[in-house]
Image: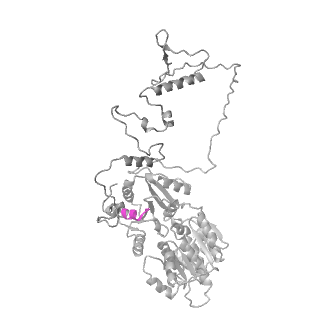
Amino acid sequence: MLFKDLSLIEPLLRALSTEGYEHPTPIQEQSIPIILQRRDLLGCAQTGTGKTAAFALPILQLLHTKQPAKPGSKAIRCLILTPTRELAIQIDESIAAYGRHTNFRHLVVFGGVSQFSQTESLKRGCDILVATPGRLLDLMNQGYISLRDIEIFVLDEADRMLDMGFIHDVKKVIAKLPSQRQTLFFSATMPPEISNLANSILTDPLRVEVTPVSSTAEKVAQALYFVDKANKKHLLQHLLTNSDVRSVLVFTRTKHGANKVVGDLVKSGTKAEAIHGNKSQNARQAALENFKKGKIRVLVATDIAARGIDIEELSHVINYELPNIPETYVHRIGRTGRAGASGIALSFCEAEEIPYLKDIQKLTGQLIPIEEEHPYAANLVAPGLPVARGKEKVAPRPAPQVQKSAPVQRPDVIPMPERRPDTQKPSPHHKPQRPRPVANTNGKDRPAERPAGQDRNNSSGASNRERDRNDRNNRPGQRPERRERSERPYQPDQRPARNNSQETPAPPANRGGRFSSILEVSSIEKQDRPKSQSRERDDRNRNSGSKDSRPPFGGDRKKKW
């Protein structure tokens, strides 16, 4: 099929002929007729398949056939929202190339640069506005942009918007759009979150999906190099010695890593520059222009620029560091092999990046060939493709062999176990009770014999123990038992004196019976204590007429606890 078979107007066909395009890509072939019917579109295609021309050409034709209600109006009729500055510049350049034979005014606005030139162009008016979410909301809040006259709204690289955290800004922009509009939704991948967003902003859309989700370009040759982290720079310099590597786009995960790679390449004599978020927009654009014109051989970029770099005849893409998001790998290698051309994608992998490699192979569904013939090869093992659940080939288990054992015969009489002898030794502190010897008529001491039929614990035995206890208490100088001492009332006059020659002092008059409390005992002892000649000072009993100048209660003295 040719572009002229898609019912495009003559100015657009002439511009396509100037650019050298004759045959549309599959996404263009399916999307252009749907957009010309003014239907909402949900397009899913991998990067590098021509999505920009798929919506830019029909938009130019729709705006050309339908003139604005007010001639000479400066209102914005089409808004194209993109996640990165580089992608916004690329789309604006494509619109300028395809609409060179039309009179449409187009403008691109993005952050990182002064807004003076952008606001001056907005005052003159534009028909098609390409913008990034941050700068667009800033100019809307300042009153330079109004979206009430928007007829067509395009959300490009929606999945990248979600990854970069612009989803809330996108919702703020959508809230300002008129309800009656045509919405075009394009994304390289279609995860569930993007599908939910598309359902919320599209009205009865038609879905176009020309390639499987997260598939890589067919004409991109991939290779994997296992290498240690310290040898990555040496391997990169080794690959650049090949004359077939004409232009190389190197991807890193961090900005610091991009600057470090550029420094190593410059030291080795290779011209290289870096583009990342810390660079100003003018520096990023200058580095990209130098790379396109062939002034530098290597361009080092971070993932933020992976979607916005469209370079013709890019021979190699090198993943200096594997991305931690598997979808990013698809976008990285999609920078080469664009528009049906062939390309080569090389990836360096160290030991810590093997889990990232496993996720990438799981997403793409294919194993990346391993290149082992290089001087910096590391001894690593590549993970294989995971097997889908339910498709595992499991060998059938053999049937378990059950062996029938003979029934246990129970004996009629259960033999009792033999009783073990008592091996417990008596305690060394144990003293067996011996009967008290009594006087014998023969003059020899022998144990008292218990009468026949009399038990140890009977009443006669109890009376004997009571008699023994009384005999012990009646001995001179013998202390009574504890139980009897507590039952007997206190009698101070019966206490034995220390010396027989010393007389026992007479008890106080108030010590006649039991004490009611310990306080009474202390008061009695205090009365018996002899009084000293010098009376101790007591501030609490001091009268008001005393000549003592010290404060009462001893306030000037420090207490030591």
Q: Is residue 5 visible to the viewer in this orientation of the structure? A: no
Residue at left 35%, top 31%? Answer: 500
Along the line of sight, the residue nearer the viewer: 190 or 270: 190
In the picture, measured across the screen, residue 365 lies left or right of residue 431, that is: right
User: Does residue 278 lie above or below 67 as drawn?
Assistant: above
Residue 106, given in percent of the width and then of the height, sits at 52, 82
Q: Is residue 275 visible to the viewer in this orientation of the structure? A: yes
- Our reading of the magenta stretch's main secondary structure is helix
Residue 285, given in percent of the width and then of the height, sits at 42, 74
Q: How many numbered circles are shown?
A: 0
Q: Quadrant where the N terminus lies?
A: bottom right
In the picture, measured across the screen, residue 269 lies left or right of residue 133, that is: left
Residue 255, given in percent of the width and then of the height, sits at 41, 65
Quadrant of residue 12 in the image? bottom right
Residue 324, given in percent of the width and then of the height, sits at 48, 59
User: Does residue 381 lie above or below 133 as drawn?
Assistant: above
Magenta-span inclusion, residue 296? no
User: Does residue 381 lie above or below 70 as drawn?
Assistant: above
Q: Quadrant where the C terminus lies?
A: bottom left
Magenta-span inclusion, residue 259? yes
Along the line of sight, the residue nearer the viewer: 381 or 29: 381
Colouring chosen for the image of the structure? one colour
Residue found at the far top of this picture: 442
Along the line of sight, the residue nearer the viewer: 5 or 182: 182
Residue at left 53%, top 69%? Answer: 161
Magenta residues (range): 251-260
User: Does residue 347 lie above or below 126 as drawn?
Assistant: above
